[in-house]
Image: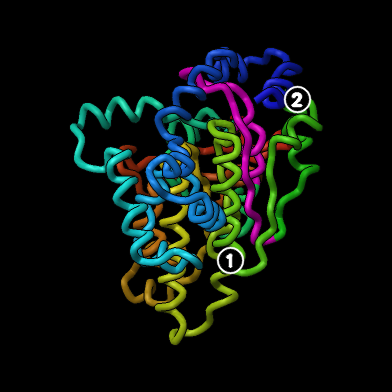
């Protein structure tokens, strides 16, 4: 939290920053503590209810660090953890149910809880407006498009803007970046940081990076990400996966492995959603596209579609379709959202990252 503030201290007031990020960083310290007390019930609490320390360590080793995380995991998966028997799992589940309120609540209570949700700016006012203020926490935002449509550029811009204070008391935070295509460039972050006059070292220190080489490794990295969020509660605000499907395309080939691929993909997306809700952070994933040979037969205007099928389509909370415009212009369209209308926004890619299109 101190480092986040150091990066913001050197920021000089520009029109964009005044309009988008005019909030006091100090106020967020209170928010962090409040969130931690509500959402971060540590698995160590199980020790006072008859669960031994060795079993708690096994849970942490599997990336399950909170009581909410235990409730989000099936008994079958818990039994697969070496050293946990069915009897132990049943006892752990029972204790969690008594400590956590996992039943029905009123819509008013849900509304009150959603006040903890924050929005992360994309760098473009038009794109923020399209998304209802920016990337929403406790949900998965997916951006898909062809190559050169700005998916990775948007990811890099978010790495910097997540650290800046924003609207409604948002005080900035750290980022976890999982790279599957070897497209992450720290030098690109430096040029974006120059746009906001941020200190390069402090800014780069706030981005936690990991390179994934296989789909299994990608899944394991999510356990490490969950552990880091638990170590520093309330500090990590964004988890980026660029791109979510690249390694699945490589590791699984042909129709014979399609069912297995989709099952593993569903588990990955479910894990991302659980992490976002468990630790109140925003999740941003990019996705690739494929040509649809049957589209010409059905007279569709656009024969391309995002890969991953219905698994990704249903798992993503908000889907953004990116396509090329003239020159550096890019067009973003809301493809699917539970609360935002279908609309379009134009933005451009500049040396300072994603910005509003200049007329």
Answer whether residue 157 is magenta in the image.
Answer: yes
Q: Quadrant of the N terminus?
A: top right
Helix or strand or loop: what does disc 1 sit on? helix
Residue 279 drawn above or below residue 108: below
Q: Position of residue 128 (x, y in %)?
A: 48, 31
- Give the residue at x 38% y 40%: 343
Q: Which tag, 1 or 2, sits closer to the chain's start? A: 2
Q: Position of residue 332 (x, y in %)?
A: 48, 44
Residue range (magenta): 153-181
Distance between the alpha carbons at the discs numbered 1 and 2: 32 Å
Q: Report the residue marked by disc 1.
A: 246
Which of the 4 quarters of the picture holds residue 277? top left
The numbered dot on residue 215 is none
Q: Position of residue 2 (x, y in %)?
A: 69, 23
- Give the residue at x 53% y 54%: 54
Q: Report the residue marked by disc 2.
A: 198
Q: Nearer the viewer, residue 100 or 208?
A: 100
Label 1: few (<14), some or many (≥20) within 10 Å? some
Residue 118 drawn above or below residue 180: above
Whether residue 319 is visible, yes or no, is: no
Which of the 4 quarters of the picture holds residue 16? top right
- Give the residue at x 37% y 59%: 89
Which of the 4 quarters of the picture holds residue 111? top left
Q: Nearer the viewer, residue 312 or 346?
A: 312
Answer whether residue 173 is magenta in the image.
Answer: yes
Q: How many marks?
A: 2
Residue 212 drawn above or below residue 20: below
Q: Position of residue 292 (x, y in %)?
A: 43, 72
């Amino acid at each position: 939290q101190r480092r986040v503030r150091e990066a913001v201290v050197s920021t000089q007031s520009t029109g964009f920053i005044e309009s988008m990020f005019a909030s006091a960083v100090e106020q967020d310290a209170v928010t962090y503590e409040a969130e931690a007390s509500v959402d971060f019930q540590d698995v160590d609490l199980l020790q006072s209810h008859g669960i031994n320390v060795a079993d708690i360590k096994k849970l942490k080793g599997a990336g399950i660090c909170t009581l909410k995380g235990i409730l989000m995991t099936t008994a079958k998966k818990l039994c697969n953890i070496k050293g946990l028997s069915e009897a132990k799992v049943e006892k752990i589940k029972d204790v969690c149910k008594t400590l956590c309120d996992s039943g029905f609540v009123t819509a008013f209570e849900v509304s009150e809880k959603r006040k903890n949700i924050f929005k992360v700016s994309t760098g473009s006012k038009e794109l923020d407006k399209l998304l209802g203020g920016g990337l929403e926490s406790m949900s998965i935002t997916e951006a898909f498009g062809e190559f050169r449509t700005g998916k990775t550029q948007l990811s890099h811009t978010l790495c910097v803007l997540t650290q800046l204070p924003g609207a409604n008391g948002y005080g900035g935070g750290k980022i976890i970046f999982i790279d599957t295509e070897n497209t992450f460039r720290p030098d690109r972050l430096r040029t974006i940081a120059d746009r906001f006059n941020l200190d390069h070292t402090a800014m780069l220190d706030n981005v936690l990076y990991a390179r994934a080489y296989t789909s299994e490794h990608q899944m394991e990295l999510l356990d490490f990400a969950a552990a880091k969020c638990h170590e520093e509660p309330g500090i990590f605000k964004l988890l980026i996966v660029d791109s979510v499907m690249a390694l699945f395309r490589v590791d699984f080939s042909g129709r014979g492995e399609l069912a297995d691929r989709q099952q593993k993909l569903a588990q990955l997306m479910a894990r991302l959603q659980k992490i976002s809700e468990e630790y109140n952070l925003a999740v941003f994933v990019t996705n690739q596209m494929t040509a649809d040979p049957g589209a010409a037969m059905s007279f569709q205007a656009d024969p391309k579609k995002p890969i991953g099928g219905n698994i990704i389509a249903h798992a993503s909370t908000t889907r953004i379709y990116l396509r090329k415009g003239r020159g550096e212009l890019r067009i973003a369209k809301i493809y699917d959202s539970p609360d935002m209308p279908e609309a379009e926004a134009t933005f451009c890619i500049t040396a300072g990252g994603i910005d509003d299109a200049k007329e």
